[in-house]
Image (cartoon, grey):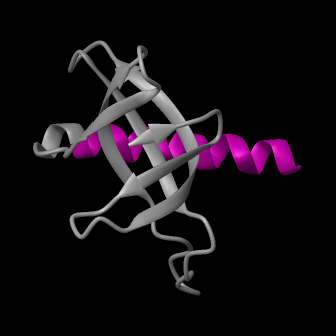
């Protein structure tokens, strides 16, 4: 995975590159990890649910500008990520008012 300021390029298991927009990143002291939430640029949106959001733990590598995405595996981590995403959306709505 390569990363820039607001966009990252994800390489899938087939070697295809996908440009994604980073929604936000955060660190969790409880889990001792950094997390990144992103969506595919130009991705198809579901009218009822909106764009598909991807969340991963992130291990940055400052030396070469690349990093490693680590799947979130525990229910506790997913609950924490979902809470952070809800807070992000609430703040976005407040900014629009």
Q: Residue 92 lies in magenta, yes or no? A: yes
54 shown above or below 40: above
Q: Which residues are magenta?
A: 78-97
In the drawing, does residue 87 fall left or right of residue 34?
right
Give the residue drawn at x 46%, y 69%. 52
Give the residue drawn at x 36%, y 49%. 55
82 shown above or below 46: above
Q: Nearer the viewer, residue 88 or 35?
A: 35
22 shown above or below 63: below
* Image quadrant in which you'd find residue 70: top left
Q: Nearer the viewer, residue 19 or 57?
A: 19
* Image quadrant in which you'd find residue 56: top left
In the drawing, does residue 60 fall left or right of residue 72?
right
Among all residues in the image, which is located at the extreme right?
97
Among all residues in the image, which is located at the extreme left?
74
Please state the horizontal and vertical placement of residue 15, each as a whole percent of the image.
Answer: 29, 65
Please state the horizontal and vertical placement of residue 90, each as a whole percent of the image.
Answer: 64, 46
Please state the horizontal and vertical placement of residue 73, each as a whole percent of the image.
Answer: 11, 45
* Image quadrant in which you'd find residue 27: top left
Please state the horizontal and vertical placement of residue 79, each as a whole percent of the image.
Answer: 26, 44
Give the residue drawn at x 78%, y 44%. 94
Q: Nearer the viewer, residue 72 or 84?
A: 72
Screen quadrant of the N terminus: top left
- Considering the whole magenta stretch, tell me its main secondary structure: helix
46 shown above or below 19: below
Among all residues in the image, which is located at the extreme bottom?
47
Q: Nearer the viewer, residue 85 or 33?
A: 33
In the drawing, does residue 71 fall left or right of residue 50?
left
Q: Residue 79 lies in magenta, yes or no? A: yes
């Amino acid at each position: 995975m390569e990363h820039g300021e607001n966009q990252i390029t994800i390489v899938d298991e087939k070697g295809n590159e996908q440009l994604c927009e980073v929604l936000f990143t955060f660190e969790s002291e409880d889990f001792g990890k950094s997390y990144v939430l992103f969506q595919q640029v130009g991705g198809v949106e579901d009218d009822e649910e909106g764009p598909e959001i991807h969340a991963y733990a992130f291990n940055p590598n400052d030396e070469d500008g690349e990093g490693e995405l680590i799947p979130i595996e525990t229910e506790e981590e997913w609950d924490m990520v979902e809470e952070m995403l809800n807070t992000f959306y609430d703040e976005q709505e407040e900014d629009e008012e």
